[in-house]
Amino acid sequence: MSEKFERVGIVGAGTMGGAIARFLSAAGVPVTAVETDLTALAGADLVVEAVPEKFDVKVAVLAEAAAVAGPGAVLATTTAALSVTELGAALPGPERFAGFVWHNPVDTTRTVEVVPGLCTAPETVARLAAFADSLPGKEALVVGDRPGFLLHGLLMPYLNDVVQAYDDGLAGAEDLDVAIELGLGYRTGPLAMLDRIGLDAHLDATEAAYAATGDRRYAPPPLLRRMVAAGRLGDKSGHGFRTQEDH
Amino acid sequence: MNNEPRTVAVLGAGTMGSGIAVVMARAGHRTIMYDIDEANLRRGLDSVHGFLDHSVKLGKLSQDAADTAKRSLSGATDLRELAPSDIVVEAVFEDLALKKELFGRLDDIVSAHTLFHTNTSTLSVTGIASGSRHPERVVGTHYCNPAPLMKLVEVADGRHTGSPAHEATVAFLRGLGKTTVVTKDRPGFIVNRFLIPWENSCIDALENGVATRDEIDAAVKGSLGHPMGPFRLLDIVGMDIHQQVATRLYEQLRDPRFFPPPMVERMVAAGDLGRKTGRGFYEYDDTRLFGS
């Protein structure tokens, strides 16, 4: 079980799926990236699912991927907020399934979280962690199956808090980001970060974390819902908190 | 107009007061540092000179510029010596009564055009301004530590701040080379408003076993692009200071995210305050602080 992965299948061509596929290809890992037709996953010994943060959607994709890739393949999800254990419980081989959580932007962030569910086999964790550690500039962190795991669990309440404070008129969007970038030295201000992540992706993740915990820090701020309803999704739609292209 | 030399009084010779005095003197303003305590004042003036000398040694400032800045700096222990001030920058302890009293006494000493700036980080600008009979000339100007190196100043008006005072303050700060952001008179303004719950949530994550100290610092620094992880930062800030700021914000906001987690109290009780005591989240052989 300790050998490298010979071929990695990536399902989902959104911001994260596309970026992970490009990063792995550039690192010399054979990659098969698919969107809806999963038949090409035959032969993959690791399948990484990066479809939208909807439980039923993820389970359907993972179950189909498991059937195509066969019982020898490891399955992984990039979820930011759903439970690895719950997703695994809906699959035929939960011992071969784990969270494999990347951060945005994929090519410059240094840590990848490997998240075992209750049923995940230690070999699966060890293999994913060794794989992440072997990638250029990456370090695996094995963390527990809690909403958001490590970094997303910390980030979601902070980003929600900033959106609410912005809606409450604490300061303008640019001033909020500039204050945090210059005052705290963060590379990216929170509203520019949300534009990059995608407001819809953040909304899905924080809704899932709120549903799982009932913790109001994860409750999506009303402005976030309004922005997503209006199609203002951030960089990918050309209009978000900081991004405002002329149409 | 912005760069026209003014007379600036800095109240308080602690870390922030000394840092702000460097900013003023280096920009060519006649700078009077005030502290009620002669020994504090001496230490503050020495610290300004030390900073300027160090800047020359690093090649960041010419000897001439440092000498000029030193000549423009003086000290005072009597408020009456601040009479010629165009701008007073208050950077004393976070004590509302003390700040109000100083502004009230200065009403009778300084001119009718003098601007009153407060560097409070957690108190209300409106509350501090209520100590003066001229709240229209009181503006919140929150510098970041170390003030001579950090470009950001948060500007917050109190309820009665006049727009001429606000406009003149922003123009003056820009003349100092600062980047200003305009925010509201709310506890913690922007920077501390978001930093304190963030640090608390990282301490919670550690205490609850979500990940280790090293993992959290590695993820935050390596994947969020923060200059350092939360525990390295807390060790520099000091756990006692974090506890004070967090508690003050909690008392005003009554939001549990601001309340220091139990681990903070245990670390303070144990004397593990961070770099300055040799042990916090990490251990240190050298207890010297950056920027002091």
Image: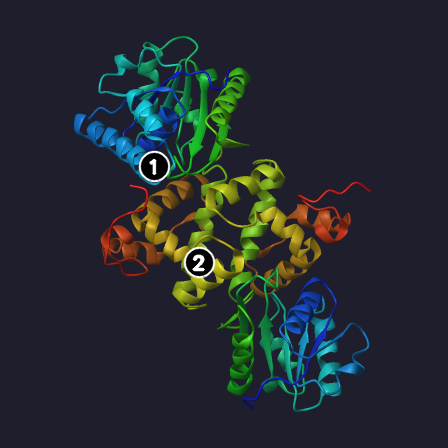
Sequence order check, earlier mark of 2 and 1: 1
Q: Residue at x 55, y 54 (%)?
A: A157
Q: Nearer the viewer, residue B236 or B207?
A: B236
The part of the image, by quadrant, that contains residue A166 is: top right
Query: Residue B55: which disc?
Result: 1
Q: Amino acid at mark 1?
A: Ser
Q: Residue at x 44, y 29 (%)?
A: B141
Give the quarter of the image for residue A93: bottom right
Residue occupied by mark 2: B202
Q: Secondary structure at mark 2?
A: helix
**Structural crowding at the residue carrying mark 1, measured as other residues with C-alpha within 10 Å and reported as few (<14), some (14–19) or many (≥20):** some
| Amino acid type at mark 2 | Cys
Q: Position of residue B139 (x, y in %)?
A: 46, 23
Q: Could you tell me which residue is drawn at 48 percent across and 59 percent down? A: B220
Question: Which residue is rendered at x = 35% and y = 12% of the image?
Answer: B107
x, y (%) of residue B283? 27, 61
Q: How far apart are the alpha carbons under marks 2 and 1?
A: 35 Å
Labels 2, 1: front one: 1
* Chain at tag 1: B
Position of residue A52 measured from the top left corner of the image (x, y, whole percent): 71, 66
